[in-house]
Image (cartoon, grey):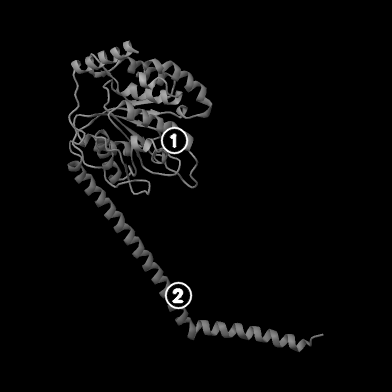
Amino acid sequence: MIDFRYHLVSLISVFLALAVGIILGAGPLKESISNQLTGQVEQLRQEKDDLRSEADALALRNDRLNEYIDAVSRRTVHDVLSERRVAIIQVSDVSDALYEGVVEQVESSGAQVTSRVRVTDAWTAGDQADARQSYASSLVDFLPEDRRDVASDKALASALVVALTQANPADPQAVSDDAALALEVLEGADLVELVSYTSVPADAVIILDARSYDGEVPDNTEQSLLYANIAEAAAHLSEGVVVAASNVVDGDVVSVIREDSSLVKLVSTVSDTDLSFGRLNTPLALAAAIGNKVGHFGFESSANALVPAAVTLDAPVRSVANAEEDAQNADGDEGES
């Protein structure tokens, strides 16, 4: 057994060490340790203040930059869409702030927004596929001849575009009877919601997607393909179309369009509509699309330019004579077929 004296010596050593530590801590080392810790705390506090100041400066600079872009954009977009009428279709929830920011640029370009329509969840819901096919069958008669043999989902997309863009041959300031009936069917089926609507036919279409994601991004490819059908229909049935999104991720509608060898040549896309840059690009891209210069604009690798090409558009022709002539030509084509 260990002698008790060894235990006693160990205990005395421990207490002696504690006493020495207390004496040194309260005496010679106290000021040194305290000053060192105080200095470190002050340094960390200063670094935190510097980072906060830097972040505030960057935020202020960003705000000023956005204000500058907004101010300059009024000159940049001035009259690029002069006298055009534009329908806006949103395929996701879009905040009023984002919507109004896009509309401000569209109106600064000389265009008029005729309607704002939101596509509902029923447009893409898997359990609504049979119902959509049934509605598409009932809407085929309202479509132009070259859109009547397409798949049911594409027929439905065509019906939506017709509802917003097809003019009355006797009155170019109003939509046609077929357009009005098509919209009535779509709204009655709860496939679309009319956020704001006028019976004035649009010349071109903007499709807005403002979906954002926290964490893992779900695979929305199937939904996005159905939304892309609307863009494709608008490319065929209106003067031009642009799909504008606040974010671009794999499987969203912008990515689906940019990755499709056919759609990429028909439909223009724009990213970052939550920023002044993207909002400015939206009417510029639409004007370029109307001028047969389809492009994809943003900072992503899938974009092919930052800024759309400059174009000068002829004023749209709206007259009863021209509308009646188009209607007679269409009747003649049907008679020959």
Q: Which badge, 2 or 1, comes first in the chain's sequence?
A: 2
Q: Is residue 267 visible?
A: no
Residue furthest front as drawn? 336
Q: Residue at x 70, y 85 (%)?
A: 10
Seen from this angle, which residue lies furthest right? 1
Question: In front: mark 2 or mark 1?
Answer: 1
Amino acid residing under circle 2: Leu
- The image shows residue 178 at horizontal and vertical percentages of 33, 15
For mark 1, give the secondary structure. Answer: helix
| Location of mark 1 (residue) | 224
Residue 193 horizontal side relative to residue 10, left or right? left
Q: Which amino acid does label 1 sit on?
A: Ser
Counting from the top left corner in percent of width and height, residue 237 is at: 32, 25
Query: Is the residue 43 above or below the residue 334 in the image?
Result: below
Image quarter (top left, top right, bottom left or bottom right) of the N terminus: bottom right
Q: Residue at x 30, y 27 (%)?
A: 238
Q: Residue at x 19, y 33 (%)?
A: 313
Q: Residues within 10 Å of mark 2 (few under 14, many from 20)?
A: few
Q: Name the residue under label 2.
A: 37
Residue 142 on image: x %, y %: 37, 16
Q: Which of 107/29 is in front?
A: 107
